């Protein structure tokens, strides 16, 4: 049994690291099989040598984030534990990032994982960015945050959000109302993100002025979109023809972000996903970035990460085994 000591600069950092009812430290203790004792601004980590060393790196990482004013929550603790276990604890300090934008309720939006940081940097640097990854990795939400930030900074005149109107396995039949009422259910996730960033009143004002447009992908045909921040969501459900049509809408002073999850394609079996093809065709093209987020970038409930990992494992186990040449015995 070894004992390591970690010192904090201020007692407030200790309080932030421990969390409500010591929930953060309890996760550290369970993850590394250590015991943490607090004495003033001093923390004692007790456990086997390797586990104690990992526990120290995790606690030091949390203290460093608290010193930078970061809020320590469950997702951040779980992600930090994964970094320490994978030997990437040297990247913990990079978790503290600048705010992308602030929501209507004053909540700061920033990257929560290293994968999300790379995604946001790619959006800022390239004209076209393709973000691919499982549900819960913040692909759409962060793209909308970047769009709102660019609009507020007057870098673009319009925000255009679009997605293909493809049913996710169900047969919804004829929906009531006019054309806008019929397509609204497909666009609801985009509305939700904009409401969160801008608030209902500001959103409605910009919508009436034409600064914001939320429309199905079919509405993009024949247009040239200048000085706009354009987001194509659920791109895995585009056909190859739709994807090519959308990409060629790019005008001067515009930026495009394409998001999707290639494991959740709802197209008929005889249709090729435009997103999967675009990833192959555009890989290596100048000023186009392809960002691949993984299960470790999931920032929803912990179970979402486990579900994604379980499905990945299941799909890999179903892959056919390639057999070598058969040997025949002479009779």
Image (cartoon, rainbow, N blue to C red):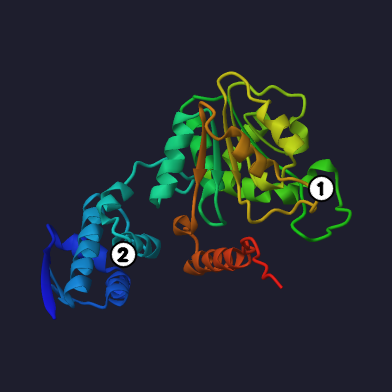
Which class describes the residues within 10 Å of circle 1: few (<14), some (14-19), or many (20+)?
A: few
Horizontal side of residue 190 vs 171, given as left or right: left
Q: Give the residue number, with chain letter if any, for mark 1.
A: 182
Residue 309: x %, y % from top left: 52, 65
Say what secondary structure mark 2 lies in. Answer: helix
Q: Is residue 106 visible?
A: no
Q: Which residue is mark 2?
A: 85
Residue 231 versus residue 85 in the image, above or below: above
Q: Is residue 103 left or right of residue 30?
A: right
Q: Quadrant of residue 7?
A: bottom left
Tell me, yes or no, whether the two marked residues, 1 and 2, touch with CB atoms within 8 Å: no
Residue found 55% across the figure and 69% down from its top: 310
Residue 3 vs 56, above or below: the answer is: below
Residue under the point 55% across and 35% down: 283
In the rendered image, the residue lying farthest to the right is 174
Residues 310 and 120: in front is 310
Circle nearer the N terminus (1, 2) = 2
Q: Quadrant of residue 221?
A: top right
Q: Which mark is residue 300?
A: none
- Real-space Cα separation, disc 1 to disc 2, in angstroms: 48 Å
Q: Is residue 169 left or right of residue 60?
A: right
Q: Residue furthest top?
A: 252
Of 167 and 148, nearer the camera is: 167
Question: Quarter of the image containing the N terminus?
Answer: bottom left
- Seen in the image, is 125 located left or right of residue 235? left
Residue 46 to residue 19: above or below: below
Judge by depth and name the residue closer to the eye, 122 or 309. 309
Q: Is residue 255 visible?
A: yes
Task: Decide: few, some or many residues near mark 2? Use Cα within 10 Å; few <14, some 14-19, many ≥20.
Answer: some
């Amino acid at each position: 049994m070894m004992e390591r000591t970690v010192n904090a600069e201020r007692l407030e950092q200790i309080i932030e690291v421990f969390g409500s009812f010591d929930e953060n430290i309890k996760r550290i203790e369970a993850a590394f099989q250590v015991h943490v004792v607090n004495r003033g601004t001093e923390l004692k980590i007790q456990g086997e040598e390797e586990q104690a060393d990992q526990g120290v790196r995790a606690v030091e990482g949390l203290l460093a984030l608290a010193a930078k004013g970061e809020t320590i929550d469950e997702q951040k603790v779980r992600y930090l534990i994964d970094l320490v276990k994978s030997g990437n604890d040297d990247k913990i300090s990079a978790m503290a990032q600048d705010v992308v934008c602030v929501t209507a309720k004053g909540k700061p939006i920033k990257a929560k994982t290293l994968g999300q940081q790379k995604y946001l940097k790619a959006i800022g640097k390239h004209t076209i960015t393709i973000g691919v990854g499982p549900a819960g990795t913040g692909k759409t939400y962060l793209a909308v945050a970047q769009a709102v930030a660019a609009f507020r900074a007057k870098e673009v005149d319009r925000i255009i959000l679009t997605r293909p109107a493809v049913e996710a396995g169900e047969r919804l039949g004829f929906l009531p109302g006019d054309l806008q009422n019929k397509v609204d259910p497909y666009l609801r996730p985009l509305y939700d993100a904009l409401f969160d960033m801008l608030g209902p009143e500001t959103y409605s004002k910009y919508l009436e002025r034409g600064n914001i447009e939320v429309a199905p992908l079919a509405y993009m045909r024949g247009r040239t979109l200048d000085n706009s921040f354009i987001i194509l969501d659920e791109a895995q459900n585009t056909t190859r023809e739709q994807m090519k049509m959308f990409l060629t809408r790019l005008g001067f002073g515009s930026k495009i972000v394409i998001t999707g999850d290639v494991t959740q394609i709802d197209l008929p079996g005889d249709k090729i996903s435009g997103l999967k093809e675009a990833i192959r065709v555009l890989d290596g093209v100048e000023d186009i970035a392809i960002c691949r987020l993984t299960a470790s970038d999931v920032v929803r409930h912990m179970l979402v990460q486990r579900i994604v990992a379980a499905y990945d494992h299941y799909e890999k186990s179903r892959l056919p085994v390639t057999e070598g040449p058969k040997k025949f015995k002479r009779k």
